[in-house]
Image (cartoon, helix red, strand yellow):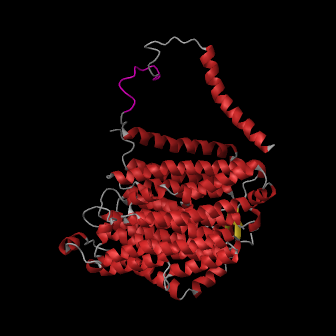
Amino acid sequence: MSAYNVMAMSPFIAGAVAVVAIMLGIAVRRSHRASAAATVAAFALMLACIPVAAGVAPRQVTPLVVIDAYALFWLAIIFGAGMATAILARDYLRVRGGQPEEFYLLLLISCIGAGAMVCSRHFASFYLGLEVMTIPLYGMISYICSGKRGVEAGLKYLILAGAASAFLLFGAALIFSEAGTLDFVGMACATVNYSGSLVVLAGLAMVLVGVGFKLSLAPFHLWTPDVYEGAPAPVTAFMATVSKGAVLAALLRYFSTVSPDTFMSLRTAFSLAAAASMIAGNLLALRQTNVKRILACSSIAHAGYVAVAFLALGDIAAHAVAYYFAAYFAATLGAFGVITLLSANGDLREHDAMEDYRGLFHTRPVLAAVLALMLLSLAGVPLTAGFLGKVYVFMAGIRAGLWWQTGVLVFASAVGLVYYLRIIAVMTATPKDGDHACEVLLPAVSSAAKGLLAALTLAVLWMGIYPAPLLRIIEGIHLSAH
Amino acid sequence: MNLLFVISFVCLAAGMVGGGLVFSFLVAPHRPGAIKNTPYECGEQPIGQAWIQFNVGYYLFGLMFLVFDVEAAFLYPWAVAFRQMGTVGLIEAGLFILVLLVGLAYAWKKGVLEWV
């Protein structure tokens, strides 16, 4: 009995042991190379523990945690994204000096928190996971504390995320006052039984505010461009992928415990938020001149797209959200990966202004091609992963009868194409003063980062051209069984 | 019915805060003086402004204190239930202390324990 629980929790145990071991290693002798290598190895170990846990899944460990196929799928892509971030961060931090070793501890802890969230079936573990994921992010965002931007972004995120957590907690407390339990199933049943109750409605609205902030859904999206711009590029990649995906995965588990027809008021609110983020994200992106801000606005829009799939609820939603996020993770990590590598050179400047990308196809053709592919995937162009992700979301929306939401999705995607193509157009233009661009854009790309970008490129193409193997895995996931 | 509950809760919360302020304003004698208006610093004479940058060492010491504070808070219940928890409890508490010890070793190595 106990041994099976240990097997089910082995990815977490491996991660926790790795954090303590790496910290001890830093105390004994500082070495950036060793820290980064140990972190990548720790992520590999955590990924290797997932098949072990799958052997005993589905399994409920204590009333707080459930390890099932859904949780394990998310754990795999979260740990994969963590590993990619570690590889990118090494190139980025290496040129910046200081004491980069502790960054990897924060990254590992944040990934463990995100993992705890996707496995949670109780509000206590959900909130614990959320905070364990968010608190290291404050440090990661302002890790480069020599400049003003990082510190400002970190402080902004600290205050706003704190306020969002307060909303989430208060909302849960209000639901608890009617339901008498913090268990997801019990809370969801209470929201059905007391659907007319003002206290429960207020609680649900406050939970929506807290979660909307984390997902950067439309009325709560204003922090996103500022924080994404100020954070180091690998951290932005991590925030745009892991911290969004994990919140939505946990939320989907919560709402999938009851039939979709019961939350009419909540569905309306969520639909409006989704539509507003699709429109606001895409329109905001049109006016930006900073590539990181464009990608931040694009991530607001993507939260809206995936919220449409989320509204379908149940297994359809679980499959669409899982596929969409797998595609989005690969493309976003790839796009921010290119920004990271361009910023990893001697002038210690963040290469995120549109001008830095002028003529990139002439100076760094391979990096430019990778970035172009990732942007096309984010735009949802056929033969890339993003296209099938959109098709999947579209189908989920149609099957659940979400007509106008799906209509907004199609319209917003068309608008979105413009700003992705704008970046690509700038990259193909001839450089203004060729010698200058060549001189600046000469970062030494490590072989690990080269391998990572190659893997992400292959993943985006493979998921776009031959998705059957991934679909087989995803369609084996059933949420409603719990 | 539910609305009544919410309203009465809000009124009660506002009354607790506002009532205390209003009542002390009405009842308390008001005779300020130069010495009375100085901030209370545990009997020390305050020097200068409070809006200055403090030595970062204070915060590091505060963090280290927190580590042991939380450790003590968790070890008391364990000590009370020591016999019932048995060997498993001993191992769990040992792991807990070990993790905190690693944190202490890290801080020591980093020079946090030396006042500069």
Identified at 70% across, 33% down, the residue is: B11
**Residue range highlighted in magenta:** B40-51
- Residue A102 can be seen in this image: yes
Q: Nearer the viewer, residue A399 or B29?
A: A399
Residue drawn at x 47%, y 22% as measured from the top left: B42
**Who's the residue at 76% across and 66% down the image?**
A261
Q: Residue at x 19, y 70 (%)?
A: A436
Decide if residue A300 is on the left or right side of residue A203: left
Residue A38 shows up from this direction: no
Query: As displayed, is residue A164 above or below residue B16?
Result: below
User: In the figure, A379 relative to B10: above or below?
Assistant: below
In percent of width and height, residue A172 lies at 68, 51
Q: Is residue B41 magenta?
A: yes
Where is residue A151? Give x, y as percent.
Answer: 39, 51
Q: Is residue B10 left or right of residue A341?
A: right
Classify A84 as above or below A131: below
Q: Quadrant of residue A453?
A: bottom left
Give the camera-side residue of A79 and A380. Answer: A380
The percent coordinates of residue A129 (x first, y second) are 59, 58
In the picture, which quadrant includes the N terminus of chain A? bottom right
Query: Which residue extends farthest left?
Result: A435
Quadrant in which the C terminus of chain A appears: bottom right
In this rendering, position of residue A215 left or right of residue A106: right
